[in-house]
Each structure stands twice: as C-alpha cells, then as structure tokens.
Image (cartoon, rainbow, N blue to C red):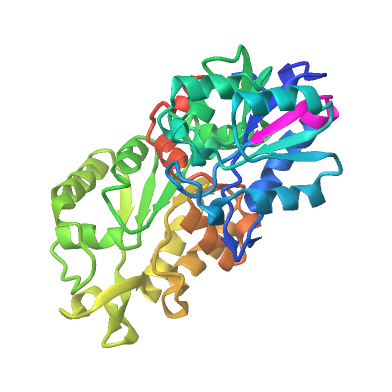
C-alpha cells in the first residue's frame, strides 16, 4: 500500500476517509481524540497544496437524517483547529461535486455531512460510490477503524480511484499491529477481557499460536470458570460456548501457552461489593471484577514481558467498587519495559480513567477492525488499497 507521502498532491482533490465518530453531549464534543489523531494527515495534504475533502460517519443513523448525528459540531471544531477556509456540504449530490470543483481552492477543506445518512454507504452502492469517486483525484484512507467495513467510502471509492493509499494514522496502526502479530519480541503476553467469549473466539485462537501467556478477565472469564466446574453464582455465562471454552483451554495446553484465570472475585452480594475466593461464591452472587489475589497473581506473571497486547476490561470499571482490577493491571502494564498495545473503545476508556493511556506504546481507537486484524482476517478497506 502507498502512503500519502508517495503522491504529488499539488492542486489535486484529496479525498480523506477519516473517523470523526466522536462522543458528544448536547451538541458538544466531549472527547476529541479521534479528530486530533487525524490532523497530521489533513495538515500534510494542505501543506502539499491539496484541496482536502473529509468524509466521516457519526453513530449509526442507518440511512436517515438524525439531527443529533450531524457532523456540524465537528465542522465548528475544525474551524478553530485549522487556520484555512472550511466548507460544509450538507448533501452529497452530483451538483455539490461540481460546486466543490469550481469553488474550492488549494489549501482549503471541505467536510461532508455524516456519510451514513446515505443508504448507499452501508450497501456499497455502485452509483453512490461513483459520486464519491468523482470528488477525488487521490483517495486516502486514514480511518483504520472502519477498514473491516465493505462500505462505499471505504471500498467502493477505492475501486474507482487510481491514486490511493493510507494516511499517517492508519500507517501507525498497521506499524504497531504488524509488530505484534508479525515477529513480536518475546515473551509475548495477551490480556483479553470484555463481556463475551463469543466475540473473542477468533482473536483467542489466532493468538494462541503466537503468545506465551494468556490472561483472561471480565465477564467472559465466567464462561471459562463455569467450564472448569466453578460456581459463578448468578453471573453472566455463555452456556452455548462452554465447549469452545474447553477447547481453547485444551489448545493452550497443547501449544504450551499458560492461561491465567481469576482466583478470586469482587461480587455484588445483595447490593454490596464483596471480595471472595472462587469456592466462596454463592448462588445469588454476580461477579463484576477480579479480586485482589488475582491482581497480584496476574501482576507477578506479567513481569519480564517484552510484548503485551490488551483488549477488553477485566471488570465493570465504570463503577468505582468494581474498577480496582482493571485499573491496577493497567498501571502494571504501563510500568513494564515492553511494547504495549491496547485497542477497543472500552479498553481505552478504562486506560484513560486509570491515568495510563499515554503510557502505552500504542492505543488503537479501532474496535472491530482491531479485533479482525488480530484474528488474521483480511480487511476489505486494506485489500482495496
């Protein structure tokens, strides 16, 4: 794949697929991380004399114009950040393309309205893809987070534009992820949490052939513990995946990968948070965090790591009484002399609350694309480039 640096952008229309899917409250952006991370690519295109057309989604409007999901607040934000003329295109039509061509000059920026307002986006409609492609002399994908989607602004446009490549953010994502799944420095450890085993089967199976240790937490650990015969009370268990959990445990043993599961837990017992040993869990208990013994057990086993990848929190960290496990391990990983990579929205939110987000070597804003890449799947958005 080519980088944005490989093209002569002078006087050309540079169509950049970005990810401005940022959290908002009352029409105000509450976390601008994704926009800030896209700025180096945008500024490079401007300095190189390009006419920049920015395309992003916000939420899941499913082809409908939902005012709360408009990108107008992002437009106002960009006007403050970029000291260049900015234009907002509310409707993507052949007429608006002609207007962009005639009115936008070198070093200026156009922001298109939420691309998912259009049914043709999710359907990768050929006619809609043609309209998008007609705006571009050069197509740049700087939204790794949507590269697993076969959408018009990701795949359809790339099929119709000759000069195409990736921006600096996508380049950075791939650089770190390839270091992790290519030839990682060992020992290589993986921490996998979150709520469901069902969404992590692919990543677990693919990582088993590469890692030395696997740490499992979050609600998904309940299914593994249940499969091993432990009583997990009234905690969430995916009973349809018990046999798969057993097969992962067996496969790890065969590949000499040591699996670390919780040895105690913080449970909700009649409305109170209690730390108990596994054999002390009662039928009405609900597991919401790993216990202090597990924190120490995991932390000690992480010593000496040279590469660590993390996806999924280890407990219900949004509530203070169930946040200790995730936050403690986050600080431990941040202190390691290792390549540390974390990905997924909940994971990053937890690392931010723990105060260690910037202490990791790389934090990926991608969710589904991050997981699918680690599963070894081909991503449509990258294949098209």
The boundaries of the magenta stretch are: 45-54
- Vertical placement of residue 52 versus 299, above or below: above
Residue 53 among those drawn in magenta:
yes
The residue closer to the viewer here, 12 or 120, is 120
Q: Is residue 368 left or right of residue 239?
A: right
Q: Is residue 193 left or right of residue 74?
A: left
- Vertical placement of residue 355 versus 91, above or below: below
Could you tell me which quadrant the N terminus lies in? top right
Residue 4 seen from this side: no
Could you tell me which quadrant the C terminus lies in? top right
Residue 97 among those drawn in magenta:
no
Q: Residue at x 66, y 21 (%)?
A: 136
Q: Farthest residue toward the top?
A: 162
**Residue 28, horizontal then vertical, whole percent:** 65, 62
Q: Residue at x 35, y 41 (%)?
A: 203
The residue closer to the viewer here, 250 or 303, is 250
Q: Residue at x 66, y 50 (%)?
A: 72
Q: Residue at x 61, y 23 (%)?
A: 94
**Residue 101, horizontal then vertical, whole percent:** 74, 22
**Residue 141, horizontal then vertical, whole percent:** 60, 29
């Amino acid at each position: 794949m080519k980088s944005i640096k490989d093209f002569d952008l002078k006087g050309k229309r540079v169509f950049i697929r970005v990810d401005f899917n940022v959290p908002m409250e009352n029409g105000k952006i509450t976390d601008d991380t994704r926009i800030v991370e896209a700025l180096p690519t945008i500024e490079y295109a401007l300095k190189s004399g390009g006419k920049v057309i920015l395309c992003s989604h916000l939420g899941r409007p499913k082809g409908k114009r939902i005012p709360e999901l408009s990108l107008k607040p992002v437009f106002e934000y960009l006007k403050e950040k970029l000291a260049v003329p900015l234009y907002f295109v509310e409707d993507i039509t052949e007429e608006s393309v002609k207007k962009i061509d005639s009115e936008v000059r070198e070093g200026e920026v156009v922001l298109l309205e939420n691309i998912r307002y259009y049914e043709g986006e999710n359907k990768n409609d050929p006619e809609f893809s043609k309209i998008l492609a007609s705006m571009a002399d050069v197509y740049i994908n700087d939204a790794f987070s949507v590269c697993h989607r076969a959408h018009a602004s990701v795949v359809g446009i790339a099929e119709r534009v000759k000069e195409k490549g990736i921006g600096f953010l996508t380049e950075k994502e791939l650089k770190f992820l390839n270091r992790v799944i290519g030839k990682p420095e060992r020992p290589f450890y993986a921490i996998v949490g979150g709520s469901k085993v069902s969404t992590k089967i692919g990543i677990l199976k693919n990582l088993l052939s590469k890692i030395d240790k696997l740490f499992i937490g979050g609600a998904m650990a309940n299914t593994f513990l249940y499969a091993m015969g432990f009583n997990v009370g009234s905690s969430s268990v995916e009973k349809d995946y018990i046999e798969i959990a057993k097969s992962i445990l067996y496969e790890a043993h065969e590949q000499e990968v040591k699996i670390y599961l919780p040895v105690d837990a913080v449970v909700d017992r009649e409305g109170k948070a209690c730390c108990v040993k596994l054999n002390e869990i009662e039928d009405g208990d609900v597991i919401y965090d790993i216990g202090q013994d597990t924190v120490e057990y995991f932390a000690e086993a992480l010593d000496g790591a040279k590469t660590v990848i993390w996806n999924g929190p280890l407990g219900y960290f949004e509530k203070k009484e169930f946040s200790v496990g995730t936050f403690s391990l986050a600080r431990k990983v941040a202190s390691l002399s290792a390549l540390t990579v974390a990905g997924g929205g909940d994971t990053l939110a937890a690392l931010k609350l723990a105060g260690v987000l910037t202490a990791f070597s790389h934090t990926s804003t991608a969710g589904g694309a991050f997981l699918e890449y680690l599963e070894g799947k081909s991503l449509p958005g990258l294949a098209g480039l």
